[in-house]
Image (cartoon, helix red, strand yellow):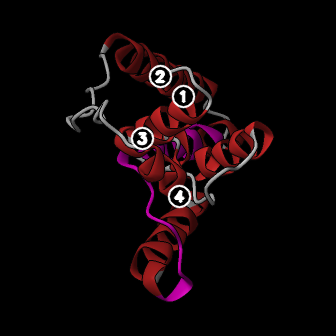
Amino acid sequence: MLWLLLAGLAAFFLWTQRGALRLPPVPPRGAAIATLSVFAMLAARSGRLTIAATLGLVALGLMAYWRFEAERTPRAASSAPPPSSKMSVAEAYTVLELSQGASPEEIKQAHRRLMKLAHPDAGGSNHGAARLNAAKDLLLGRG
């Protein structure tokens, strides 16, 4: 019982002081799994293995269900319009931050460097990544 009280006090302190401690926000699902895991460990520590096993299985079941739900639900496509196919050569050089007459190797390096920043998986947008691809394809003669 003392462990439960200490865990509750620690959770209350972290919840009330999270701004002062500059802790990142915890998603509700992560908080639920962490809470179930802590209670399972406390139950195991106090000798209530049946309760500990039940809480552990509930946590695992929730994680499996949420993963299945995430894989089953398709991600929303970006509503950004596709880049214009009428991009000029000068605009392509500007998009890739290059000067006129850059070599194919410089174009590839600039594309790779900017794509690391503009890729949707790195926090960029689909529209920005598509513009970079269109500019590279135009300058390399593929578009």
Hey, what amino acid is under mark 4? Leu
Q: Residues within 10 Å of mark 4 (few under 14, many from 20)?
A: few
Residue ID at (56%, 52%): 96
Viewer-proximal residue, 79 or 15?
Answer: 79
Labels 4 and 1 touching (C-beta < 8 A): no
Which comes sooner in the sequence, label 4 or label 2? Answer: 4
Counting from the top left corner in percent of width and height, residue 47 is at 68, 35
Depth-wise, is mark 4 or mark 3 nearer the camera? 3
**In the figure, is residue 85 to the left or right of 38?**
left
Q: In terms of sequence position, does the residue under pointer 4 or pointer 1 come before the other? A: 4
On the image, the x and y values in percent for residue 52 come to: 58, 30
Residue annotated with mark 2: 143
Per the rendered image, the range of residues in magenta is: 20-41
Looking at the rendered structure, the number of numbered marks drawn on it comes to 4
- Quadrant where the N terminus sits is bottom right
Which residue position is annotated with label 3?
131
Q: Amino acid at mark 2?
A: Gly
Where disc 2 sits, the SS reads: loop
Using the image, tell me which numbered label, if any, was put on residue 137.
1
Q: Gap between marks 4 and 3, in whole Å?
A: 55 Å
Q: Which residue is identified by label 4?
A: 4
Secondary element under disc 4, as helix, strand or loop, is: helix
Q: Nearer the viewer, mark 2 or mark 3?
A: 2
State whether the magenta stretch is mostly helix, strand or loop.
helix
- Which residue sits at x=64%, y=26%? 49
Q: Earlier in the sequence, mark 4 or mark 3?
A: 4
Q: Residue flagged by tag 1: what amino acid is it?
A: Asp
Q: Is residue 83 above or below residue 91?
A: above
Cβ–Cβ below 8 Å for labels 2 and 1? yes
Q: Residues within 10 Å of mark 2 (few under 14, many from 20)?
A: few
